[in-house]
């Protein structure tokens, strides 16, 4: 977490257990949005932005050569620490760059 730029987006990093927990919190919303039920759903990379909470863009492997990108806002713990899905980009690849988005 060195060189944190508050309000700026960090570089792409390998997903952690915490990243996976955030993905798990929004999985139901993701499946409702995409109309898919994911048997494979593994966070692999992420970028984050620290604001009054934390914004994430997360690359999730969903089986085979298929990946999706999630845009998620994580509330501050003092506000409940709830993860809110802001958007999903489907049909991305292992090599698709992680860029901030909301849809």
Image (cartoon, helix red, strand yellow):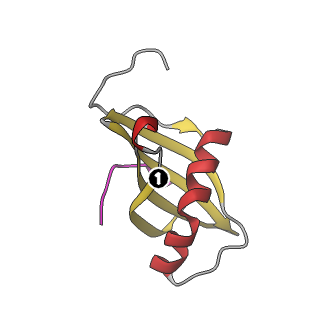
Say which quarter of the image contains residue 51: top left
Q: Main secondary structure of the magenta part?
A: loop
Q: Secondary structure at mark 1?
A: strand
User: Residue 94, can we see it?
Assistant: no
Q: State the residue at coordinates (53%, 62%).
A: 26
Can residue 72 be seen here? The reply is yes
On the rendered image, what quadrant is the C terminus found in? Answer: bottom left
**What is the number of callouts on the image?**
1
Residue 97 in percent (x, y) is at 44, 50
Nearer the observer, 22 or 36:
22
Quadrant in the picture for residue 19: top right
Residue 7, compared with residue 55, is above or below; it is above
Up/down of 52 relative to 82, above or below:
above
Q: Which residue is mark 1?
A: 83
Q: Is residue 19 above or below residue 42?
A: above
Magenta span contains residue 97: yes
| Point 68% across, 41% down: residue | 17
Residue 12 placement (x, y as % from top left): 48, 37
Name the residue: 47% across, 51% down: 82
Q: Is residue 101 toward the left or the right of residue 94 in the image? A: left
Task: Describe residue 6's horizontal placement relative to residue 70 as left or right.
Answer: left
Task: Reply above or below: 103 against 15.
Answer: below
Residue stretch in magenta: 96-103
Q: Is residue 74 magenta?
A: no
The outermost residue toward the top is 2
């Amino acid at each position: 977490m060195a060189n944190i730029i508050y309000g700026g987006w960090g570089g792409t990093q390998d997903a952690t257990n915490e990243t996976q927990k955030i993905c798990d919190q929004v999985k139901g919303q993701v499946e409702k949005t995409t109309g898919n039920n994911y048997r494979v759903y593994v966070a692999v990379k992420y970028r984050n932005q620290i604001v009054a909470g934390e914004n994430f863009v997360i690359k999730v492997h969903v089986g085979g050569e298929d990946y999706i990108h999630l845009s998620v806002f994580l509330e501050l713990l003092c506000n409940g620490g709830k993860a809110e899905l802001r958007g999903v980009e489907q049909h991305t690849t292992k090599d698709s760059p992680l860029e901030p988005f909301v849809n």
